[in-house]
Image: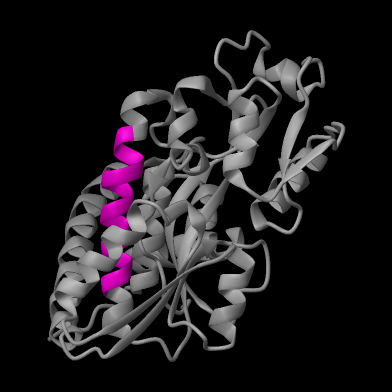
Amino acid sequence: MKKSKLSLKWLEVFLLTARSGAVQEAAQESGLSVSTVSHHIRSLEDALGVNLFDHARRPLRLTAAGSVFHAQVDEAMRLLRKAETEAQAGDLAETRELSIGLIEDFDSEIGPELARSLAAGMPKCRFRHLTRPSHEILALLRHQDIDVGIATRPQFGTDDLTEAPLLRDPFVLAVPLGDTTTPEDHLAGRSPLPLLRYSGNQIMAAQIEQHLRRLRVTLPARFEFDSNQSLMSMVADGDGWAITTPMNYIRAHRFHRQIMLLPFPAKSFARTLSVFTTDDSPGAAVASVIGTMRRLVEDRAVAPTVERMPWLDGLFRVLPDTSGPED
């Protein structure tokens, strides 16, 4: 059998770049650097001897050869993921213990469904589910107190963990229903309502503040909330507006009729929710968690939200698994 000279990582990065049309977006979704993504694309094109992208255009567009290659690779990767899942399924029945840490975003609906689905495939397993903030989940993983963590990707400091990107959760504005202030005026400080902030110890809060600094936006810091429900309650009551995400809006069910989501008015940005593991995490169980979470997040969160707010299509989406060592 002739051995392929193509790297699996090259192919994964190629598919991400083809979908987004931007190297920077592919880098964000895969957790790789922009230079690494560019290197993988160049290496793949060099190995094939053809240009897969028209590099002179923005966003990037597939060439004719790239389109043909993309169709075949997309199908091949689908079959590979299916084979991997089926090969690992036999080990699941023998799994005896599994500890999972989840952020609150998934606690109310997706968490219980995850437990039920995993229990069906692991009849001998004893499960432990914890709900914690992202930074605590990552700490529990490093101390080997849990096997799998589902958390917001921090800006730095996860090189010692294995990451499978799960969800792109864009930052948006949450305002009281009927609010007539434009998103631009909110961000410029021309709103009669104050900005309600998330607690500074949250990874998401740090991302928001960093982005506001990049935009040179300075707004008074009068209110800070550790609880998403409390923050959303204040917005619903007309006492302020917030920079949040669709996932945080989704879990504030009781306030949906009193809150509007609006696109972020300046350069868009997003957080990435990922499945984190260590080298000691049980492979078959981890694969089952990743696959189940991807399905549940799509069915329970992304699809119904995009149906209600079509402008989120492509912005709020499940991400493919690109975990594994870099080449």
At a point 34% along the width and 87% down the height, the residue shown is: 282
Q: Name the side, left or right, on which 222 lies relative to 293.
A: right
Residue 56 x %, y %: 51, 39
Q: Is residue 54 above or below residue 16?
A: above
**Count of all numbered marks drawn on residues in the image:** 0
Residue at x 63%, y 68% (from the top left corner): 135
Q: Which residues are magenta?
A: 288-304
* Magenta highlight on residue 295: yes
Report the residue at 62% width, 40% height from top.
230
158 to 306, vertically: above or below: below
The quadrant in which residue 84 appears is bottom left
Q: Nearer the viewer, residue 303 or 125?
A: 125
Q: Quadrant of residue 302?
A: top left
Q: Main secondary structure of the magenta part?
A: helix
Residue 173 is one of the magenta-drawn residues: no
Is residue 89 depicted above or below 40 in this figure?
below
Residue 231: percent from the left, percent from the top?
64, 38
Whether residue 6 appears in this view of the structure is: yes
Foreground residue among 299 and 321: 299
